[in-house]
Amino acid sequence: MSQTPSEVWKNCLSFLKDNIQSQAYKTWFEPIIPVKLNDNVLSIQVPSKFFYEWLEEHYVKILRLALTKELGPQAKLVYIIKMENTFGNKMPFTEKIPSSSSSSIKSQSIDSPFSSFASELKNPFVIPGIRNLQIESQLNPNYTFENFLEGDSNRLARSAGIAVSNKPGGTSFNPLLIYGGVGLGKTHLAHAIGVDVKQKYPDKTILYISAEKFTQQYVDSVKKNTRNDFIHFYQLIDNLIVDDVQFLSGKSGTQDVFFHIFNHLHQNGRQVILTSDKAPIDMQDIEQRLLSRFKWGLSAELQNPNYETRLSILKNKLYRDGVEIQDEIVEYVAKNINSNVRELEGAIISLIAQSSFNNAEINIELAKDVINKFVKNNRREVSIDYIQKVVSDYFQMDIQTLQSKTRKRHIVQARQIAMYFAKKFTKASLASIGTQIGRRDHATVLHACKTVDNLSFTDKQFRKYVEDLNQKLSN
Ligand code: ADP
Ligand code: MG
């Protein structure tokens, strides 16, 4: 006499219903569809990855209990996540919950995102006395889509931004995470989305905030004992834009509060837009549960613009500023400044400044002069982060693998090569290199440098790796 999945699930539900709050039951259990039952394995379909993670985080114990009651101690649960993710490739996939009962579940109370708002809200932007909460968006109206020029380097991020601003909260790009190096337009694009939403949906509350300021506000609120007001305030926002979330690294209190705010907003269909100088996979000292949230929506990279894009950005800027410069000179600048857009703009501004100080015409000689100085002063030091990224990309592994404790030969070699280049290309001490590359000590780094030297002599294949990487890193 075999049971059907629906019967089993129905019994589980009645047990769950008795044991959790009805609001939570409705939200988290009613939408679940039982799909399959094979021996003692029940497969249930959940609407999203978010759902799955939430269940895992908050209800795994009680779920296991309910299931064990129904199917015995060998009971297992399989989640089928209906993914309607990026670009509509509807790929259902399955994930099993950890079958051992040791799955760590934090036992702290569930800070329910459904708790009703406190009736009095304090705005951390401080407009005392205003009852009818008005939130200044903190947006910069000069950063728009129109003046964010499109190119191969930013097409994905820019179009995702436009999609989001047309239907905030209504696309699968939630959160939208825009990442890329300095000066590539993250802040500009983030504002542009906000500015556009504001225009299209005047009733929505939008807030732009840097992660740094968010952190300050949070710390203040803890000092003043207004942490709840802080949270409630942020939970009111329809479109929250947080710039430079890498700033939250290592700040666990702020991460925790952000996690709750994020969940609340996401759960209620509000839009979250984030920027970061790194891809989620490369972010360090950010809690796993928060990182996994960052990955739910779309991570879109801003890359270095190519020559054509640089040229059109420059021309557009000059045009808007009403400055005329010969094409030849603009082309020269676009060709020679290829690091990022901020430097590109900086170079052209210093060119214009030079010419007006000296009362000289902007000619190609002046341009060469200015640009040469500019490039020299701005030659970037390669960072250890960057070295790890280049090395791990080269060996097709991710940075976590590179840093891991494993003794697998090819991973050890990649790590040693990263250390070797960190020594060669940065001014960092052996100890600091060790800390940054997987928390090793200085002796390990020293040993790595010697090993790489030796192997480059004796092993031809190895030498090739080192040469390739040397070239990549010297560009
Ligand atoms: P990030 O936040 O990534 O460091 P910003 O958004 O501050 O970079 O951009 C640096 C400068 O470059 C800003 O003045 C911005 O307007 C400009 N900029 C970046 N990308 C573009 C683009 N595609 N078109 C026009 N201006 C751009
Ligand atoms: Mg920025």
Image (tube, rainbow, N blue to C red):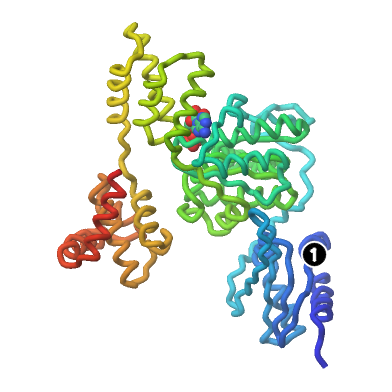
Residue 401 x, y percent position in the rendering:
41, 64
Left or right of residue 449, residue 192 in this image:
right
For badge 1, the amino acid type reads: Pro
Residue 361 x, y percent position in the rendering:
35, 9
Residue wearing tag 1? 31
Of 65 and 87, nearer the camera is 87
Q: Residue at 71% across / 39% down in the picture?
A: 166
**Where 349 sits versus 205, above or below?**
above
**How many numbered callouts?**
1
Looking at the image, which residue sits at the far bottom? Answer: 1
Residue 167 x, y percent position in the rendering:
73, 42
Choose top left, top right, bottom left or bottom right for residue 440.
bottom left
**Where 13 sits versus 207, above or below?**
below
Of 71 and 154, nearer the camera is 154
**Where 407 sits versus 367, above or below?**
below
Choose top left, top right, bottom left or bottom right for residue 369.
top left
Left or right of residue 287, residue 110 in this image:
right
Choose top left, top right, bottom left or bottom right for residue 194.
top right
Looking at the image, which residue sits at the far front? Answer: 328
Q: Is mark 1 within 8 Å of ligand 2?
A: no
Of 422 and 142, nearer the camera is 142
Viewport quadrant of the C terminus:
top left
Q: Residues within 10 Å of mark 1 (few under 14, many from 20)?
A: few
Q: Residue at 58% across / 70% down in the picture?
A: 104
Viewport quadrant of the N terminus:
bottom right
Residue 384 x, y percent position in the rendering:
34, 49
Q: Residue at 30% across / 48% down in the picture?
A: 473
Looking at the image, which residue sits at the far top? Answer: 359
